[in-house]
Image (cartoon, grey):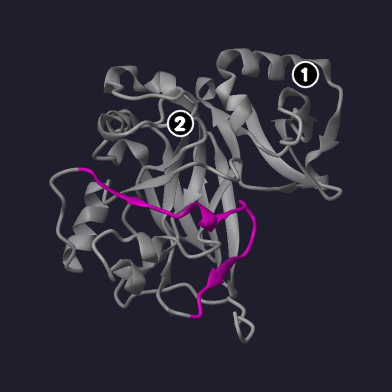
Amino acid sequence: MRLVTFDHEGKTRIGAVGGDRITVLSSLLPAGEPWNLIPLLEQGADGLARASELVAAGRQTLALDEVELRAPVIRPGKYLALGLNYKKHAEEAHRKGIKTPKRQVWFNKQTTCINGPYAPVHKPIASDKLDYEAELGFVIGTRCRHVKAEEAASVIGGYLVCNDLSVRDWQLHSPTWTMGKSFDTHGPTGPWLVTRDEIEDPHALHIRSLVNGEIRQDASTNEMIYSCYDMIEYLTTAFTLEPGDLIATGTPAGIGAAMDPPQFLQAGDVVRCEVEGIGHIENEVVLEEQPEKGL
């Protein structure tokens, strides 16, 4: 199933995509939260079964081209991302002076960076070193702690495409990387959440990014150093993961900062990120507006 969050006639709701139609699923959610996918994830298999029944009934549908898709999870409790998780990317980063880590290196993207799959992203006022990172992402479906890797698939709610946009000079202001990873609009995700039953192996998917139609990254998720399941085991050793938490699994080689000379994103550039079996997101870079005086 492909679960979406969307805007239509001034309202934000959730649904399931089938062909060129969306079945509205808001009736499965608590009153007052028709936009929030997390309560559906919390219902687990029972919630997805009820969603499938609504889709099969064929009622309350909208044309896909009549809605605006939002990030599947608008307000994740956490947005965690793993750095340097592809060997060739770690090698290109090492050539730029970043040491290859011996363990998983995690950072937070502040959840205010969340953005839609086709929404514009800002070239920030504060920097001219904006870069792209195509990534496979997954969303936690079950509250969990101390999960072993061999059991970790069961706590994943679904998969999506992420662009971990990065402001490279701000990224290096501190060892945590959080500042350079969390600018507003720099977390486009989507276009939908593909439930785990539709992805046979998340570690055998073609992934790539294109800037203005030029292929920049082109790899397979089988090149990841740590699997999605390794990540869950590592993270849940320390803290609880909850439904709706968003995990980005790292990016392949080919980032703009590693090119010679570096190729950072400019206003008017269009970045497309694709993951096999899931789909693509595509975002135009626009100049961030100057803040009004006094703000």
- Residue at 77% x, 47% y is 7
- Image quadrant holding the N terminus, namely top right
Say if the magenta span includes residue 112: yes
User: Crowding near pointer 1: few (<14 within 10 Å), some, many (20+)?
Assistant: many
Q: Is residue 225 left or right of residue 159?
A: left
Q: Position of residue 90 (x, y in %)?
A: 22, 54
Q: Is residue 263 left or right of residue 8?
A: left
Question: Which element is circle 2 on?
Answer: loop
Q: Position of residue 243 (x, y in %)?
A: 50, 30
Closer to the observer: label 1 or label 2? 2
Tag 2: residue type?
Answer: Glu
Tag 1: residue type?
Answer: Leu
- Residue at 37% x, 68% y is 256
Give the residue at mark 2: 242
Q: Position of residue 126 (x, y in %)?
A: 45, 80
User: What span is colored magenta in the figure?
Assistant: 104-125
